[in-house]
Amino acid sequence: MQTLIDSGIAFIITLQGAGDWLIAPMRFFSYLGNEEFFLLVLPLIYWSVDSALGLRVGIILVTSNLFNNIFKLIFAGPRPYWISSHVRALWTTETSFGIPSGHAQNAVSVWGMIAAYYKRSWVWATAITLIFLIGFSRIFLAAHFTHDVIFGWLLGAVLLWIITRFWEPVAAWIGTKTLNHQIFIAFAVSLLFIVLGLGVTTLRSSYQIPQDWVNNALLAGAEEPDPIDPNGTFTSAGIFFGLAAGAAWIMSLGGYQASGPIQKRAIRYVIGLIGVLILYLGLGAIFPRGDGFIFYTLRFIRYGLIGWWVAGGAPWIFIRFKLAERNNSI
C-alpha cells in the first residue's frame, strides 16, 4: 500500500508541475462530477428532458453516494494532501476518506447511465471522455490518488451494470403492486440503506484519524478531516425514498411527460428549483441539526420531501397549470 501512496504522490507532483494553467480547467471538469452539479442536472432531466431518464439518474446517483460512503469507511484511506506537504491541495473542501473517489464513481454512474439510456455512439464517446477527465482532474487537484479514482470507476461500472440490467424487470414487478405497496417497498429499501450505512459507521466509530493527517490538511488550507459522519447515509436514503415514492404517486395519477415547447420546459425548471430551494432552506432553518436519532430522522424527512417534490410534487403542479402533459411511461 505504501508503494501505491509513494508512487501516487510522485505522479501528482509531476502533473502539477505541468503548470498552473491547468488548474482552472481541472476544477471545471471536477465540478462536472460534483454532487451539487448532478443535483442541478437531475431535476433538469426529469422535469424538462425525459422523466424516465431523470428517474434512473436520480436513483443511481443516490445509490452511488450511499455505497461510496460505505466503501470509504471500509478502506479509510487518506487523501494525498493529508499525508504529504509536497503536493498542493487544489480542491480543499473534502472531509471524507479518499478511496474510492466519489467523483469518479458518480461520473461513471450518471454519465454512463445517460449513455446507456440513449445507446448512441456519440453519447458514449462524450460520456467516456467526461468520465476520464473528471477522474484525471481529481488526481491533478490532489483530491485523490490514482488508485482511488480507478477503484471509483470500477465501483461505478458495477453499479451501472446492475441497475441497467435489472431496471426493467424490477420496474415491471413494482408496476404490478398497489401505490401503497410501492411506497412501502421504497421505504423498506431506504431503511436497508440506513442499516447498511449505520452498520459500517458503527464499526468505524472508535477509529482515530492520525493527527498528522489532520495537521497536514489544515496546513494545506483545507477543511479538517471529519470522515465518520452518518449524515450522508440519511441524505441518500431520504432522497431515494422521496424520488421513488414521488414517482410512484405521479404514475398513479397518470404519469408525467417532460416534453413540450422550450419555453414551458424552462418555466418548469425555474418553478421546480424554487420549490427545491424553499424546502432545502426552509426545512434547514426549521429543523435543528445535531447528532442522534431525532436529528437524523429530521434529515431523512427533509431530503425525502425534496426527493418527493422533484419526482412527484413539482410534476403535479406542472400538469395542474398546463405546463406539462400526463404520460405513464416513467
Image (cartoon, rainbow, N blue to C red):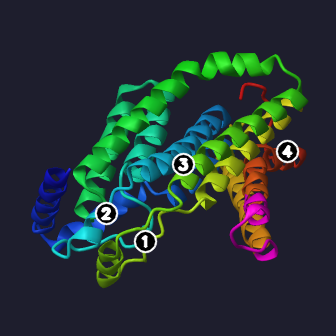
Lower position in the chain sequence, tag 4 or tag 3: 3
Helix, strand or loop at mark 2: loop
Instruction: Report if the CB atoms under discs 4 and 2 are less than 8 Å apart.
Output: no
Lower position in the chain sequence, tag 1 or tag 4: 1
Point 10% across, 69% down: residue: 17
Q: Using the numbered discs, state the Cα–Cα distance from disc 1 to disc 4 in whole angstroms.
A: 42 Å
- Residue 320 in the image: x percent, y percent? 90, 46
Most frequent secondary structure within the magenta stretch: helix
Point 72% across, 50% down: residue: 307
Instruction: Report if the CB atoms under discs 1 and 2 are less than 8 Å apart.
Output: yes
Q: Using the numbered discs, state the Cα–Cα distance from disc 4 to disc 3 in whole angstroms.
A: 38 Å
Tell me the residue that label 2 is attached to: 79
Check residue 316 in the rendering and tell me which mark sits there, or answer none: 4
222 left or right, relative to 47: left
Tell me the residue that label 1 is attached to: 225
Helix, strand or loop at mark 1: loop
Tell me the residue that label 3 is attached to: 200
First to last magenta residue range: 285-299
Amino acid type, residue under disc 1 in the picture: Pro
Amino acid type, residue under disc 3 in the picture: Val
Reply yes or no: does residue 297 show up in magenta.
Answer: yes
Lower position in the chain sequence, tag 4 or tag 2: 2
Point 80% across, 36% down: residue: 325
